[in-house]
Image (spheres, rainbow, N blue to C red):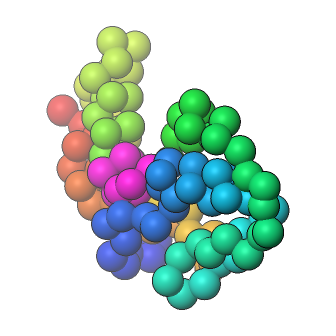
Amino acid sequence: MLQRPIEPSEFFTDEVIRGLLANSLETAELRAEGFVDVGTGPGSSEAAYIDWLTISDQAQAVVDDVARIKAHPLVPARIPVYGYVYDVRTGRLIEVPAATTAGAAA
């Protein structure tokens, strides 16, 4: 498995998508600095009422998920649980070392 640093936070947040949709319902453009609204409007404020379930820290989300699975009463302590992030650019799995530690067998 490939191990590389995982970005600590993402630039796509609930606030970003809400702001984009408030300005325009057209597809935003992704640039180096993040998403940019290229539409002419109108937008909608309805996006403010949706929880978009964005993940601000991928590695921590994986650690939290592994810890939750390990703590489940139907998962025997002797079974290790691992955590990875799928890199959509390369198609590789990137191990999250803290998740491997959290999911170690007892």
Residue occupying the point 43% across, 64% down: 10
> Residue 25 appears at what percent x and percent y?
78, 55
Residue situated in front as seen by the camera: 24 or 28: 24
The answer to whether 40 appears left or right of 99 in the picture is right
> Residue 90 appears at what percent x and percent y?
62, 79
Q: Would you identify the image quadrant in which residue 96 lies?
A: bottom left
The answer to whether 27 appears left or right of 18 in the picture is right
Q: Would you identify the image quadrant in which residue 32 lies?
A: bottom right
Residue situated in front as seen by the camera: 93 or 20: 20
Quadrant of the frame with the C terminus = top left
Residue occupying the point 35% across, 56% down: 57
Q: Is residue 61 magenta?
A: yes
Q: Residue furthest bottom?
A: 32
77 up-or-down from 60: above or below: above
Q: Would you identify the image quadrant in which residue 5 lies?
A: bottom left
> Residue 11 appears at what percent x and percent y?
46, 67
94 up-or-down from 13: above or below: below
Residue occupying the point 21% across, 50% down: 101
Q: How many marks?
A: 0
> Residue 80 appears at what percent x and percent y?
33, 39
Residue occupying the point 28% across, 23% down: 71
Bounds of the magenta segment: 55-62
Camera sees residue 25: no
75 up-or-down from 35: above or below: above
Q: Residue furthest top?
A: 73
Q: Main secondary structure of the magenta part?
A: helix
The answer to whether 19 appears left or right of 42 in the picture is left
Camera sees residue 19: yes
37 up-or-down from 25: above or below: below
